Each structure stands twice: as C-alpha cells, then as structure tokens.
Amino acid sequence: MKAWKQLIDSGQNWSDMRRLKATNDFVNQFTFVDDIDHWQQEDYWATPLQTLVTRGGDCEDFSIAKYFTLTSMGMDEDKLRLTYVKALSLNQAHMVVSYYDNPKVTPLVLDNLNTQILPATQRDDLYPVYSFNGKGLWVNKKQQSDQFVDSSERISLWQKLLKSMDVEAANEPAMICLYQYYDLTDSEARTRCPD
C-alpha cells in the first residue's frame, strides 16, 4: 500500500507517458490468479485495494488497478478506457487499459500479457469488443473510430465495483485487514480485524 501511495504522489507531476509506464510496471508485478481460485467466483472485478493487498488478480483486476492508479495521479478520465477484447492467441476474453492522447488517435494499450505499451494497431493479438470509463460505453471497431453507445451504468460489474470502492473509502484500515485474511471465513477474518 505504501509503495502504491508513493507512486500516486510522485506521479502527480509526471508526463502522461511516464505515468503510463510506471503504473503498467507496478501493477504487472503482481501474480496472475484466476477469479475462481482467487475469489471463489467465476467472474469478479476486484477493487484496486483488493488487488494491491492480495498482490494478485486477473486481467480485469490488473486493468482496474491501472485505471484508478492513473486517475488518482490526476490523469484525465477522458483519456482512459477499460477495453474488453478477445485475446486471439488465448482464444478468450481479456481486459486492457486504452490510453487516448486525444479521441482522434489510435490508443496505446496497457496490458499484462504483453507488458510493452504499444499502439492498438500493433496489437494484432487483441480484437477490441467494447470499452468504457466512468463517463460512457463505446463499441469498438478494429479499423474505425469507436462508437459511443450509452452510459457505463449498464455494466453491472462496474457498478458493483464502484459501490465496493465507496465502502472501502469509508473504512480503509479495516478493509485492508479483511483483504489480508480473505482466504479465511468472514467470522475468522473479522476476529482479527478492527471494526
């Protein structure tokens, strides 16, 4: 937690490119763990705090942690989207962060499969499906501009994540403690953690 908060504080005055690289490198050091093994659920979007404390997660968790780290550094949310893609080499769904220096240019991709930050046009291994941020939802086209379709409120896992983050913000020390003991039963974890 301390290293993450230091990263955010240091990143306040950095260029966007330096923020992207530092954030991508920081989050990609965590261990990849499938949701079923990590959270005992088929599909779970962990909060950045959960990912940081447990030092692990899957592609959605890594992308979410990167997204909120960057916005906490002061990066404009309009430049960032969480992008749901098909990872062609793995033949499975995958999530990355897309960075748009401006809406008219090809975004850069922050990923845990390929840790280099590359333009989307150089990521032939990914097929974009849709992207979103706190302001909207877009349908992606490989060689065309994205089409805005709706509010991101339609994405139930996103809404659940935001609510969980609000709960964490109200009592961060207790939540950190609970996440440290997430593999115990709720009652066992609660006996070790403050209210």
Image (spheres, helix red, strand yellow):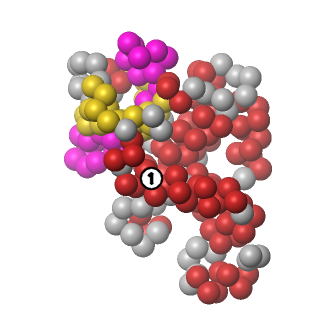
Residue 36 spot, x, y in % from top left: 39, 68
Is residue 37 part of the magenta span, yes or no? no
- Name the amino acid, label 1: Gln
Task: Give the vertical position of 110 relative to 14 (above or below).
Answer: below
Is residue 104 part of the magenta span, yes or no? yes
Identity of the residue drawn at 25% across and 49% down: 92
Identity of the residue drawn at 28% across and 48% down: 93
Q: Can residue 56 be seen in this view?
A: no
Rate crowding at label 1 as few (under 14), some (14 to 19) or many (20 or more) other CA atoms within 10 Å.
some
Residue 142's image quarter?
A: top left
Q: Is residue 185 visible?
A: yes
Q: What stretch is highlighted in magenta?
A: 83-107
Q: In this view, does 76 lie to the left or right of 103?
A: right
Relative to the observer, which residue lies in front, 153 or 39? 153
Identity of the residue drawn at 37% across and 17% down: 106
- Which residue is labeled 1 in the image? 159
Residue 9 spot, x, y in % from top left: 76, 35
Task: Give the vertical position of 158 relative to 42 (above or below).
Answer: above
Residue 148 spot, x, y in % from top left: 31, 28
Residue 43's image quarter?
A: bottom left
Q: Is residue 56 left or right of residue 97?
A: right
The quarter in which the C terminus is drawn is: bottom right
Residue 126 spot, x, y in % from top left: 29, 34
Identity of the residue drawn at 33% across and 41% down: 84
The mark tally for this picture is 1
Could you tell me which secondary element the residue under label 1 belongs to?
Answer: helix
Relative to the observer, which residue lies in front, 169 or 93? 169
